[in-house]
Image (tube, rainbow, N blue to C red):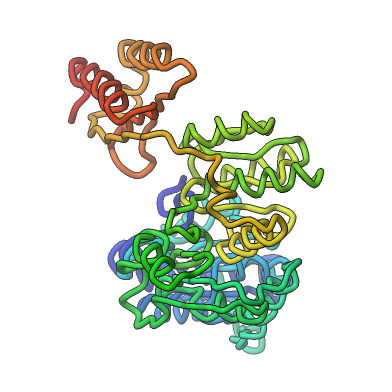
Amino acid sequence: MGKYFGTDGFRGEANKDLTFEHAVKIGRFLGWYYGARLGKKAKVVIGKDTRRSSYMFESALCTGLVASGADAYIMHVTTTPSVAYITRVDDFDCGIMISASHNPFYDNGIKLLNSNGEKMDEETILKVEDYIDGKIEVPMAERAAIGRTVDYVAGRNRYIGYLISLSKFSFKNVKVGLDVANGAAWQIAKAVFDALGAKVYVINNQPDGCNINTDCGSTHIEHLQKFVVDNGLDIGFAYDGDADRCLCVDEKGNVVTGDHTLYIYGLYMKERGKLLNNKVVTTIMSNFGLYKALDKVGIEYEKTKVGDKYVYENMVNTGNRIGGEQSGHTIFIKYATTGDGILTSLKLMEVMLAKEKPMSELAAPVVFYPQVLKNVKVKSKPDAQNDPDVQAAVAKVAEALGDTGRILVRESGTEPVIRVMVEAESDEVCEKYVDEVIEVIKAKGHIA
């Protein structure tokens, strides 16, 4: 991670941590880097979510891009995966998404994508940061070399058409609930499900710039749970602010997480001979219950660091075809270069219709183990993590749990804390072992 950009872009409170000036400079650098530096005119596509500040950042990025001689194509309110798709298929030099994902409305972020619709490489990100800090000079475009802005809502429509084309079934007479989080999916998701014939019931689809993710969407799934049950729906899907993640609710109101999705679709692929390498890709935060369920059906798995970036890198390097996070970032690499909430919805619908089974039955084999996670504020994350006595305590817990659970101790990527997590067959066991490790951290003087 760099000075400004983390694993998922430059993110912070709008005009406090991430400012209008930052956005202009990012546009200035990218317009030159992909254009004038190479003796050509760059083409850059931009999407945004529904936050009030997204409109400001869109204008700022366009200002910087055209001042450096690039043409800025504006998709308006759209999802992160749609920008990734259009960047790739319409031959853009790079793509930009303005969103802070599941964060509150007053935060925002700028995500950069390369010409393949993948997250921007670290080397280029560091050059962007050097320009922001005044370490690189970028010339202004002049006369006819100055860029222009282009309305590109057609790109969003093309993405909608792409999603519709991926469905193998009609959704006729299936009652589907959608919680679009007052965010980027608020128009797109319903358009897709309507076109496929579903009876669509939508909530939280009145964005006002300040209500994105507010008590709604995938971070507040309880509202969709109640909505599905109260209305007798067959299934429900909840997205986050930029719709790169999806959580599902079955017909009984139970939550179907990203871990469930990996099991359901991974098994479906295996049954059809489509699961190359016979593996799914998870992160270290996937629930122990997922691994137990995969073991029972003979599916192998790999574990990456937390972050869909690392899941995608594994898939590219190994040829594994499906991966994701418990939070709902699921990557179907045959169809997308990033997590895509609406695509995930369509894939879950596909399994449900192909097998003619309700979602509750498809998800039932994944029985989540109780989990306790506690954050410990420390003076030095590496010192606490690498302390021999702390490591010995962790090893002791792991040995005691055996194949009935697991312990995970990791450093936070954004805070001065160590996260201690235990999954086991009961909450009492989880609490006991988490507290044992934390006591050692305290006894060794690592607590801040």
Residue 18 visible within the image: yes
x and y percent of residue 209 in the render? 35, 80
Q: Which residue appears at 71% of the width and 41% of the height?
A: 320
The reply, left or right, for residue 112 in relation to residue 58 is right
x and y percent of residue 101 in the render? 43, 62
The answer to which of 117 and 18 lies nearer the viewer is 117
x and y percent of residue 375 in the render? 27, 36
Q: Which residue appears at 37% of the width and 59% of the height?
A: 219
Q: Which residue appears at 66% of the width and 88% of the height?
A: 144
The reply, left or right, for residue 34 in relation to residue 428 is right
Q: Which residue appears at 63% of the width and 33% of the height?
A: 301
Q: Looking at the picture, does residue 347 appear above or below residue 144?
A: above
The reply, left or right, for residue 13 in relation to residue 146 is left
The answer to which of 317 and 58 lies nearer the viewer is 317
Q: Looking at the picture, does residue 146 appear above or below residue 260?
A: below
x and y percent of residue 88 in the render? 71, 66
